[in-house]
Image (cartoon, helix red, strand yellow):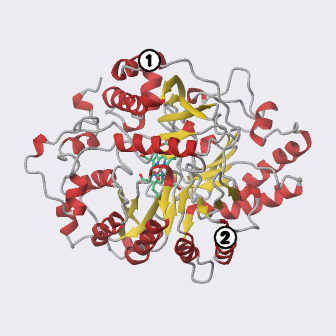
Amino acid sequence: MNDEKQLTEVEHIKARSRHLRGTIEEGLQDRTTGALPLDDTQLTKFHGFYQQDDRDIRDERRHQKLEPLFSFMLRARVPGGVIKAEQWKAIDTVARELTGGGLRLTTRQTFQYHGILKHNVKPLIQGINKAMIDSIAACGDVNRNVLCNTNPVQSALHKEIYDDAVAISQHLLPSTAAYHEIWLDKEKIVNFEEEKEPIYGDTYLPRKFKIAVAIPPHNDVDVNGNDLSYVAIIEDGKLKGYNILAGGGMGSTHGETDTYPQIAKSLGFIAKKDICKIAEAIVTTQRDFGDRTNRKHARLKYTIDDLGTDVFKGHVEERSGVKFAEEVPYEFTMHSDRFGWVENADGTWNLTLFIEHGRITDKEDGPQMLTGLLKIADLHGGDFRMTATQNLIVAQVAKSKKAKVEKLAIENGLLRKEASVLRQNSMACVAFPTCTLAMAEAERYLPDLIGKLEVIVDKYGLSEQPIVVRMTGCPNGCARPFLAEIAFVGKAPGKYNLYLGGDGKGTRLVKLYKENIGEDEILQTLEPLIESYSNERNKGEGFGDYLVRTDVVPAIYDGRDFHKNPEGFISSGI
Ligand code: SRM
Ligand code: SF4
């Protein structure tokens, strides 16, 4: 399918990298620059880290004729987001000693460090490795961190499903020894030609690949934002198997209508024993059929849309030897985390903390969140679970320790009882100053905007109504905005596209309502819609559903309709 002459540069870099080794080691030794050679910055992603520079001071540095202030962001691989208290302590030590400070929980149940200087990358990887945490395949054109519903050990059944998520992650790890050689000083392979990558091949996948495991009715992992999802089917208290969804994804480019977010398509039901066979068959089908000539068209969603779902499914069945059965009916009703205390089946308790946009720091003149969590880790001995909405669960707390954990959480700004329902349902990507692709602020701005929206929802008696609000600094969709009820997607500093109409369960896409608007227009646009929602909504009807029912926006269930209105539909927005 791919014309050799038209392959993207990244394909050539991968091909000549000797299974992701490139010249990373040599680049690390070069003390004349804080950066790595350009080709290697593509390869380091497969090892879990990105080269960045501080965009707040980029212009100033240019004026001073200095190279940008380069540093690195490292993302860990933590399938299902489960971290033991002892591991948390190691993560904390590394954050304090080797990074710009603090942690950032991500939308994929893991954490990132920012501001790592080049000479600190290796000690950092060794530091987390001591706590049995790695960053292999956390980024790059491979399968990344596998998501799993966040209460995995609440019952034996949840534990079984979590174990499946870990098994899938393990099965799809690249085989190359590059990570161990470069970062952990393991013996170098003498004859590289003999090293095999049985699943990925020498050039890995055409693009990143993402997997989630969900347990209905909870869609906290946003199955439709993933290339491959397993929806657990439970009957009579037993795991029967999984429905398989494929081809979901968020990324798009402003103004390029052949790029779009997409809802995953159902392939059918499989037995539990076939989970890894199916994962491998889908990954290798994407490896062989995905577009390697255009990275904007290289995700699985385009491969499936181009081949047709039935043809794609046929390839998967042939490669896996597994025949999909009819999809088993299921329903999602929840999209967000359950905050506060929840009792587990074994009598222990989980405390879900709202961590606004996942940022955990010790502020000079504010909450000591990092230190607070360290104290909780010291005290409780259970584990922590990172959620796919950037929050954190202190899990399996003994009843006798509940009061102390809660006190520490309150004292350190981790349990914010004043945080409104609207705020708790909001999510923003990192954007400025570290993200190289940001066009507008997200994490640093959404908290303020939420404050202004809170005034409006309070005015119309909606302060208890969960409305899913998400903001990203560009249309790559890192906070999965296209599955929200209200989405702001950055276009330029201070300007956002406003999208509306998701269903609050993550099963319908939003639709563009206003383009390139600033804060005043955002508030002026949303207030009358919120007012009429307050007056005219049906019992139990969500904001997005109301907007679709009253024809403010059309219902979008297929990304190929994302850029157009159905025939005869006239938007009151643009
Ligand atoms: Fe993302 C690129 C941050 C989840 C779609 N994402 C980036 C980079 C690495 C920018 C870059 O390439 O230079 C961002 C680093 C910012 C920084 O300074 O930390 C970045 N993405 C994030 C995180 C940290 C956002 C957050 O606020 O939590 C999330 C880390 C997840 C993780 O732990 O693995 C994150 N990114 C997502 C998601 C959501 C998800 O996976 O559930 C998506 C949409 C789903 C999808 O993949 O379709 C997402 N990120 C992208 C894309 C667009 C991909 C595409 O198909 O077009 C890019 C750009 C790219 O790959 O070229 C991107
Ligand atoms: Fe950066 Fe865009 Fe992702 Fe936000 S959505 S983190 S701005 S790539």
Say if 30 sits above or below 518 in the image: below
The residue indicated by pointer 1 is: 323
Element assignment for label 2:
helix
Say which quarter of the image contains residue 562.
Answer: top right
Say which quarter of the image contains residue 182.
Answer: bottom left
The residue indicated by pointer 2 is: 400
Place of residue 278 in the rendered image (x, y in percent of width and height, measured from the top left): 41, 28
Q: Nearer the viewer, residue 522 or 469?
A: 469
Q: Residues within 10 Å of mark 2 (few under 14, many from 20)?
A: few
Say if 316 sits above or below 433 in the image: above
Figure quadrant of the N terminus: top left
Outermost residue, right side:
535
Task: Name the side, left or right, on which 1 lies relative to 88.
Answer: left
**Would residue 345 be visible to someone looking at this image?**
yes
Element assignment for label 1:
loop
Outermost residue, bottom side:
365
**Label 2, label 1: how far apart the Cα atoms are:** 50 Å
Place of residue 563 in the rendered image (x, y in percent of width and height, measured from the top left): 59, 31
Residue at the spot 74% in from the left edge and 33% down from the top edge: 571
| Amino acid type assigned to the residue bearing label 1 in the image | Lys
| Amino acid type assigned to the residue bearing label 2 in the image | Ser
Residue at the spot 51% in from the left edge and 35% down from the top edge: 229
Task: Name the side, left or right, on which 254 lies relative to 517.
Answer: left
Figure quadrant of the C terminus: top right
Residue at the spot 54% in from the left edge and 64% down from the top edge: 382
Q: Earlier in the sequence, mark 2 or mark 1?
A: 1
Say which quarter of the image contains residue 413.
Answer: bottom right
Place of residue 518 in the rendered image (x, y in percent of width and height, measured from the top left): 67, 55
Place of residue 111 in the rendered image (x, y in percent of width and height, measured from the top left): 47, 60
Outermost residue, left side:
190
**Would residue 340 be visible to someone looking at this image?**
no
Where residue 350 is drawn, which disc sits there?
none
